[in-house]
């Protein structure tokens, strides 16, 4: 019995020794390989501004909350570019979307708050948009117009002192019916782009009905055969069952706005503009969820991937990579 116990103890001792010898030391993590993000964030990110940019930014926010950080609430508003800056300057929002570049007066107002543009405030170009002239589905005469015709019809006093412009004033063979002019109101960067860049800051026809909501513009034009309006290409894409776009002749023949023609060096360049978002860096430093969302916006999963789905032409990858480097340095 004693010998059997001794043999059993010897076998157990050998088994323990072999197990110990069989253990391999763990390989240290490669410092050059980025570890998967495990930090779970929470909190609120507040975005407001451009109604034109809204569908794209809202889509990015939805993807971020679904796939990246479900405990972060990204709230996206659409007050308009100018109205958005009025909230952004005093620090009420973290991001301000704009369908036109920030103005010198707005930069000065930020500096009065102690915020230096380019350091405390960062500008990101999200994508390219094509200003689109839209008409009623039953309008079979104004499907193609020159840029000059569009500009002149919207200018006050160009045809009649009372600004009651007829289609036949534009081309004699067109109907002898009054044109109903529509567009976004002064809160929107699209209005400012149209007034400042397209109309060259000349007075717009007094009969133009300017609206806050783009959905209202869609409804008004869809119900009036003599209506014309302008807004971003993305809103046209999502409502082309109700409206038709005017092909614009910039001098080399009519060009329809499409993702293949919208671009600074492409055929629709005359009505192409960049759209932006602006970040309050101080907020991003204070709240990791704001910085993390900013990185997602300019990542290959953000604006670059989702621009086309929302009627915008994306910039080259190098543009977004440059923005990501800026954010990684914070």
Image (tube, rainbow, N blue to C red):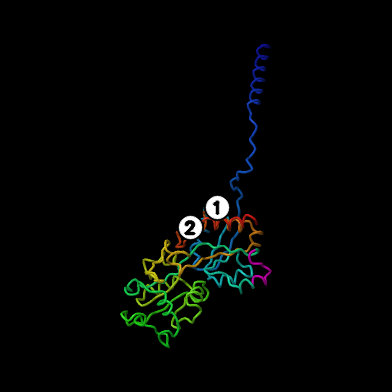
Residue 278 horizontal/vertical position (percent): 58, 65
Label 2 SS:
helix
Q: Nearer the viewer, residue 60 or 197?
A: 197
The quadrant of the picture occupied by the C terminus is bottom right
Residue 196 horizontal/vertical position (percent): 51, 76
Can residue 57 be seen here? The reply is no
As drawn, the residue found furthest toward the front would be 252
93, above or below 18, in the image: below
What's the distance in space between the residues labelled 2 and 1, CA to CA? 15 Å
138, above or below 28, in the image: below
Residue 229 horizontal/vertical position (percent): 42, 74
Residue 243 horizontal/vertical position (percent): 37, 69
Residue 113: say if magenta: yes
Residue 214: say if magenta: no
Dot 2 alpha-carbon crowd within 10 angstroms: few under 14, some 14 to 19, many 20 or more: many
Magenta segment, which residues? Answer: 109-118
Can you identify the residue that label 2 sits on? 306
Which residue is depicted at the point 64% across and 21% down? 15
Label 1 SS:
loop
Which residue is depicted at the point 43% across and 70% down? 132
The quadrant of the picture occupied by the N terminus is top right
Dot 1 alpha-carbon crowd within 10 angstroms: few under 14, some 14 to 19, many 20 or more: some
Q: Nearer the viewer, residue 91 or 127?
A: 127
Which residue is depicted at the point 36% across and 82% down? 169
Can you identify the residue that label 1 sits on? 68
Q: Is residue 63 left or right of residue 161?
A: right
Who comes first in sequence, dot 2 or dot 1? 1
């Amino acid at each position: 019995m004693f010998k059997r116990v001794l043999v059993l103890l010897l076998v157990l001792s050998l088994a323990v020794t072999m197990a110990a010898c069989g253990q391999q030391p763990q390989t240290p993590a490669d410092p050059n390989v980025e570890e998967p993000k495990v930090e779970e964030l929470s909190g609120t990110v507040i975005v407001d501004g451009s109604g034109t940019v809204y569908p794209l930014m809202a889509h990015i926010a939805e993807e971020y909350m679904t796939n990246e950080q479900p405990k972060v609430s990204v709230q996206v508003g659409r007050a308009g570019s100018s109205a958005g800056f009025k909230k952004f300057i005093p620090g009420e929002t973290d991001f301000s979307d704009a369908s036109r570049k920030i103005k010198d007066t707005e930069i000065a107002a930020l500096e009065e708050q102690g915020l230096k543009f380019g350091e405390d405030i960062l500008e990101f170009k999200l994508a390219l948009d094509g200003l689109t002239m839209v008409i009623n589905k039953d309008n079979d005469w104004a499907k193609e117009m020159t840029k000059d015709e569009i500009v002149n019809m919207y200018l006050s006093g160009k045809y009649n002192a009372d600004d009651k412009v007829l289609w036949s004033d534009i081309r004699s063979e067109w109907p002898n019916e009054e044109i109903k002019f529509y567009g976004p109101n002064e809160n929107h960067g699209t209005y400012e782009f149209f007034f400042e860049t397209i109309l060259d800051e000349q007075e717009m026809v007094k009969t133009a009905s300017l609206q806050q909501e783009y959905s209202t513009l869609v409804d008004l034009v869809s119900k009036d055969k003599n209506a014309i309006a302008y807004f971003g290409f993305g809103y046209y894409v999502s409502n082309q069952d109700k409206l038709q776009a005017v092909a614009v002749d910039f001098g080399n023949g009519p060009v329809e706005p499409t993702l293949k023609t919208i671009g600074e060096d492409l055929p629709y360049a005359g009505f192409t503009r960049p759209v932006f978002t602006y970040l309050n860096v101080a907020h991003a430093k204070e709240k990791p969820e704001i910085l993390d969302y900013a990185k997602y916006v300019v990542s290959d999963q953000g604006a670059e991937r989702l621009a086309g789905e929302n009627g915008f032409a994306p910039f080259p990858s190098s543009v977004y990579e440059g923005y990501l480097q800026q954010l990684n340095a914070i």
